[in-house]
Amino acid sequence: MSAAHDDHHHGPAKGLSRWLFTTNHKDIGTLYLWFSFAMFLLGGTFAMVIRAELFQPGLQLVDPNFFNQMTTMHGLVMVFGAVMPAFVGLANWLIPMMIGAPDMALPRMNNWSFWILPFAFAMLSSTLLMDAGAPNFGWTFYAPLSTTYAPETVTFFIFAVHLMGASSIMGSINIIATVLNMRAPGMTMMKMPLFVWTWLITAYLLLAVMPVLAGVVTMMLFDVHFGTSFFNAAGGGDPVLFQHVFWFFGHPEVYIMILPAFGIISAIIPTFARKRLFGYDSMVYASASIAFLSFIVWAHHMFTVGMPIAGELFFMYATMLIAVPTGVKVFNWTATMFRGSMSFETPMLFAIAFVVLFTMGGFTGLMLAITPADFQYHDTYFVVAHFHYVLVPGAVFSIMAAAYYWLPKWTGHMYDERLGKLHFWMSFIGVNVLFFPQHFLGLAGMPRRIPDYALQFADFNWISSIGGFMFGASQLILLVVVIKCIKGGKKATAQVWEGAQGLEWTLESPAPYHTFTTPPDPKLIHAQ
Amino acid sequence: MASAGSHETYYVPEQTRLPFFASIGLILTIFGLGNVLNDIRASESSSFSTLIAVTGFLLLSFILFQWFSTVIRENHAGMNSDQLKRSYVWGMAWFIFSEVMFFAAFFGALFYVRNFAVPWLSGEGGKGPTGEVLWPEFQAVWPLIENPNAAIFEGPHESMAVHEWSLAFFAKYLPFWNTLILLTSSVTVHFAHTALKASNRKGLIQWLSVTVALGLLFLSLQVIEYTEAYGHYGLTLDSGIYGSTFFLLTGFHGFHVTLGTFMLSVMLARAIKGHFKPDDHFGFEAASWYWHFVDVVWVGLFFFVYLL
């Protein structure tokens, strides 16, 4: 029964049930990507409220407590709702096609990983409408702000984090099983596209740290509801314990949000430079080194909290070490472009902007790594500028680059290049106007997470807000581009991009509903 | 990995309602539970919230039952290729890894509190005068009996740690017996596995029954221990950091033992129905891996929570 059953290909089911009950990696990838985009707009709306309030000094639009809810929800929604699901969506779409597998290893669980998320975020967002208001203790939810002094909605926040963790853990198990077990004959580990490699490492990181996040919110839950004193010194606990456990999750988390981006950029730059990626092996080892180092640097987020000097020094040097493998990557991307036959389609523009601006964010990271200097920078807008440079023109730009790069493969149509370029330039200018002045604000001493500020910060703040509105508005262009591309446009070829390498480009565009039900010809698999 | 010549198709299931409804069951459970907790804290009636949570949990359990049944049915129908079976093996292995990291968070908290936080509170390490100003009387000892602020967190009268290193003490020391019970159960579940591989169904059922019994025995001793802790030792969740770490570590371990015992009972029922074959029994193996995992965690617990 099963053989005959498997041999003819089913198309997608009709109507809504296709999306609710699907086990297809492409459908689930699409769901993740749309969910991520919706969360990007929601989190973006929160950011617009923040920037509007900060447009000029004084309290204008929202009261301080609501402002805190906005910063908290903005961070949570962007990290857990926009960036992470976007990468999981890309992994779903691309990993099976890149390694010549028929689907993800565990297709039903794949559906579950996705469908937990909308419910979890609905619960988290519903706190905005509750009497006590949404969580207001920052996305890092430091105790005792998030325990002793938290609004009662902290309970829903904690459970939402548990659900997101469950979703991530199941998604990661699926990705690891797929990569280790589902590669087509001939697809050896060192022939895998870097996106697959970086996701394999990311999934490992997720499995290592999402349970720790679950652990720390569980301790919060018990402190809030059952009288334990993990984070209460009166009972012998320590609020600093919270920070240690949180950042043991939190630091690998930032690499979770950037490693898949490295994989994307490593796919796009060779295509448009029309050269093989420079230093494939070193890229793999550099990613693994970054993953390893990410476990031993967490306390650089806590230099000012009070640590023994040996701890401060250890975490400073370990943090600086990360610059080495990261530098390897930036060097390799640059070397790939060197003397390449470059062309500048939208994905390439985003990729180049990524390399330049992510590197800038990396450099400010090095500045922050210097313990004595961090005593000045800590909790200022310099930190805000730093992590937004690595996350927005870093992670988010890579996601946009990926969307433009693979959209023709997904939809079968070329996107509108003119609109794409407009989107890129608006975003590029917007993001720099938005975040660059925040470096100056931070160095001048403006603290983060405040709704009002001293007069001397006024100029850079309105510039930053203008950039914010510009960046925010230009994301609607992306929505238009994607919808137009789904509806129609120039027919895409299988190859799509002249210089593109890899199994997904051997499939017709749009990629058929089921692909590689029999493994591809090993001759199609090339060294990277 | 699969050889190109004799390629088996990897079974990709058709669309399924299971995960979507499992998500609904899960969110109802969690949302209901969150409301129950908040109702209790606000001293309000929590009956409606409880209803939501229970409904959700029943739905979730029903769906998971269906889900596992489907997977088992498909395997019996021969739809699972060797490659698919390896996916389950990888899946379970990495799931256990994530569980290890969950416990690592609590063990890490215990180490941090014992080695840093509590000594610092008593003024060690030149951490400034905070501890001395707030609680000058505070003495760093572990297990912590006297909390820094006894008005808020009344400490236990006694700890669960080893009081004296003598045979007479260990003979009446429940955690010691629990260690023996769990270690034995790891061996018996291995015997069950050996019997299964040797097509000895009777042996499988006997050894598995022994393992489940040992699991239940462990849990009953834990219940006795908890009753003593609350009743006689004054050791509770809100008796300061010693109680916090003690109950969360042993409590989550106990929860995992409960889960493991449940898994093994299901495997026992399946063994009685004749489900497993000597060369095809990953369901059993996964449950036994899980059981070994909870044993290893217990050994860590016994050392770091009770002995040291």
Image (cartoon, rainbow, N blue to C red):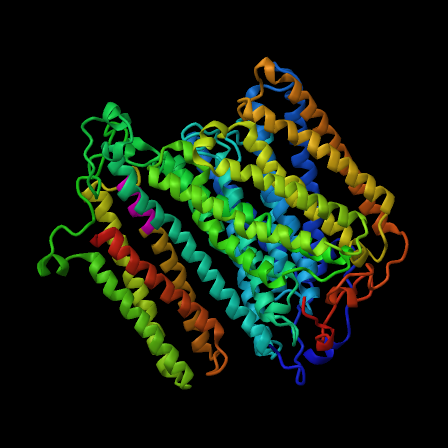
Side of A516 where A327 appears, left or right:
left
Residue A38 sits in quarter: top right
The quadrant the C terminus of chain A occupies is bottom right
The residue located at (41%, 65%) in the rendering is B290
Q: Which residues are magenta?
A: B241-249
Q: Given the current orientation, which residue lies at the most extreme front position?
A: A339
Side of B154 where A398 appears, left or right:
right
Report the magenta stretch's main SS: helix
Whether residue B265 appears in magenta in the rendering, the answer is no
- Location of residue B274 with respect to A257 vertically, above or below: below
Q: Is residue A1 visible?
A: no
Residue A441 sits in quarter: top right
The quadrant the N terminus of chain A occupies is bottom right
Side of B307 where B87 appears, left or right:
right
Q: Given the current orientation, which residue lies at the most extreme right position?
A: A490
Q: Nearer the viewer, residue A207 or A335?
A: A335
Side of A78 where A4 appears, left or right:
right
Q: Position of residue A315 (x, y in %)?
A: 42, 43
Q: Position of residue B49 (x, y in %)?
A: 50, 39
Q: Position of residue A520 (x, y in %)?
A: 73, 74
Q: Position of residue B97 (x, y in %)?
A: 45, 60
- Location of residue B231 with respect to B22 vertically, above or below: above
Q: Nearer the viewer, residue B275 or A217?
A: A217
- Location of residue A512 with respect to B270 vertically, above or below: above
Q: Nearer the viewer, residue A112 or A399?
A: A399
